[in-house]
Amino acid sequence: MALFVCIASLALSKAKEIRNRVTHLLIAISGVFTTAAGVMGLLSPPQQLLLPLGLPWLPMHLRLDPLAGFFMVIIGLLVTSVGIYSVGYLRSRAKTQNLTLLDISMSLFIVGMQGVVLADDAYTFMIFWELMSVASYFFVVFDHEREANRKAGFLYLLMAHLGALLILSSFSILYMAGKSFEFEVMRTVTLSPTWLSLVFLTAGLGFGLKAGIIPLHIWLPEAHPVAPSNASALMSGVMIKVAVFGFLRVIWDLVGLDQAQGWWGGLVLAAGSSSAVGGVLLALQQHNLKRLLAYHSVENIGIIVIGLGLAMIFTHFDHPGLAALGLVAALYHTLNHALFKGLLFMGAGALLHSTHQRNLDRLGGLIRRMPITAVLFLIGCISISALPPFNGFVSEWLTFQAALMAPKLESSPLAALIPFSAAMLALAGALTATCFIKVFGIIFQGTPRTRSAAEACEVDGWMISGMALPAVLCLILGIGPVWVIPLIDQVSPTLLSSSLERATTGSHWLWLTPLSPERASYSPLIVLLASLLAGLVAFLLYYRGKPVRRAPIWSCGHPDLNPRMQYTATSFSQPMRQIFSKVYQPHEEVSRLNHGNPLLVRRIRFSVHIQDLAWKYIYTPARKIVEWLTRGTDWLHQRQIHGHLSLVFLTLLILLGFLI
């Protein structure tokens, strides 16, 4: 279906507005079919397909099993939403720009993600993985006139290919042992602990690069903000989840957790904890809305990885029920994050479309000018903040339960790491709520800080419909986990020797009670009804019988209120910047402009700069080392053409010597 969209884009490349509508409606329809195929994969036995494509001795093997089906559902839901949203989002750009490359890139990007999920051999997996990476590169450099976009594109492509090289290395080790690229053969391979650990490390680093695990995340806050918002929604909502799928397919399915060593789960859990807290700490200090959301993707990938790490530890110590709970919690949050992060990126695109502003401090008062967008964006904020009754609370609550139910383990370091990860998860949740109070308050409340914010208007029905779908799903997944978890649990037998079997063990369908009724329980419907009732009572008590009086806002004695007097994103996050100053290492500057007299201040300018510590301590030193090593090859650039040809010929002879 997505390939058909490519053909339609080329055929209609002259009729820009018609092409825009037809292309993205076809993309939305392809998302519906993808979702349906995913549901079939979840509920049916594994199905295989052999395509005689590519090299004669390397046909493409495809497989739709519950694991692939679950991720196909994620891809399909967000592709449907983004397809509808893009009709309105790109309408004005279609009149002035040629969007053929963007449309074709998006279609191939979707094909690449679907192919990775369905691949049943390493050859097919890597072809579609590279297709996904290269197609998304064109999202990043779409506005290539800007130097920042070109730099972000180069960084993204560099990190993507480094990750692909690491993934290819893990497949190479499995191929050497089984002499086949087929996953069915790789599942039967037996390796020594050293080789198994090497497969784990190379695959973990490769997929971690694409997922954005700290400290491999540096491309993500550079690439996502500069891509078109509909593309950012897919990249953050779906593409980084495909990396989670790859880790599950290679380590959990092909290698198998029965061969895993004890320290694997501990390393995964530590990586998830650091990403969850580190991502939200960096997000708190951002002013660019899309950059802030990109850092929150790092945080939420960390939460997913915490669940996977817990499941790996419990599997190693033979606690199958807890392992299944950790896996289901991770998969639930994978689905949840795809929905609310896609919603938030589309909301950011709606704000950018209406105000042409990314900076939080240049917005304000938009709840009166864009009320529907404000409500939908608020749903995304509540969901990502893990507040009931929306979906983010359920998956994080399940992750907490998996950690809190942990029995006494034989390994002291792991026994200490699990409660530490639970504490980090709690800290990340609190900081996320703080961050999105800032985001929603600065953007939608107060008064407009710029003329563009004051003149903003609501976006069209296509964009609202595209945002409404994930918003509704956020509520459905928040109030209906008792019905959703059994579907997600269909994946467990593919990866583990057990499953949750039933979503609840309580006495009533209203209650979500993982594993044991003696532990904590949660009733989302009761929480929803209680919240609505409390809100109704508060409304009646406050407004009943009271006349409404409108008056100017009290301004502490100032005669005139100025929008610059409002709280800014910088001032809101200042307490956290002080508390975590050792982590942020902020560089602050204050400059004063006086009226000739030092006591008469005309203007005070405050600026603060925070550098990602991964750049400071890892990538900047690494770049300097590479530059130093490459200085010895400067003489190669000064040779004439025959010298370069001689070097190519010599290299060819050496390679032929190895083959002979």
Image (cartoon, rainbow, N blue to C red):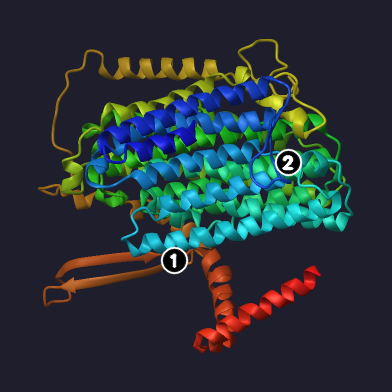
Badge 2 element:
helix
Front residue (pair 499, 571):
499
Task: Tell me the crowding category of disc 2: few under 14, some 14 to 19, or many 20 or more residues within 10 angstroms, Cα based.
Answer: many
Q: Which residue is mark 1?
A: 586
- Give amino acid for label 2: Leu
Residue 287: give x, y in percent of width and height: 36, 53
Is the Cβ of the residue at disc 2 closer than 8 Å to that at disc 1? no
- Give amino acid for label 1: Pro
Residue depicted at 26% across the width and 13% down the height: 544
Q: Is residue 605 above or below residue 532?
A: below
Residue depicted at 20% across the width and 39% down the height: 456
The mark nearer the N terminus, 2 or 1, is 2
Q: Which residue is mark 2?
A: 310
Residue depicted at 37% across the width and 33% down the height: 23
Res. 484 image quadrant: top right
Residue 180: give x, y in percent of width and height: 80, 47
Front residue (pair 621, 286):
621
Q: Is residue 442 left or right of residue 525?
A: left
Front residue (pair 51, 345):
51
Q: Is residue 278 above or below residue 552?
A: below
The label nearer to you, 2 versus 1, is: 2
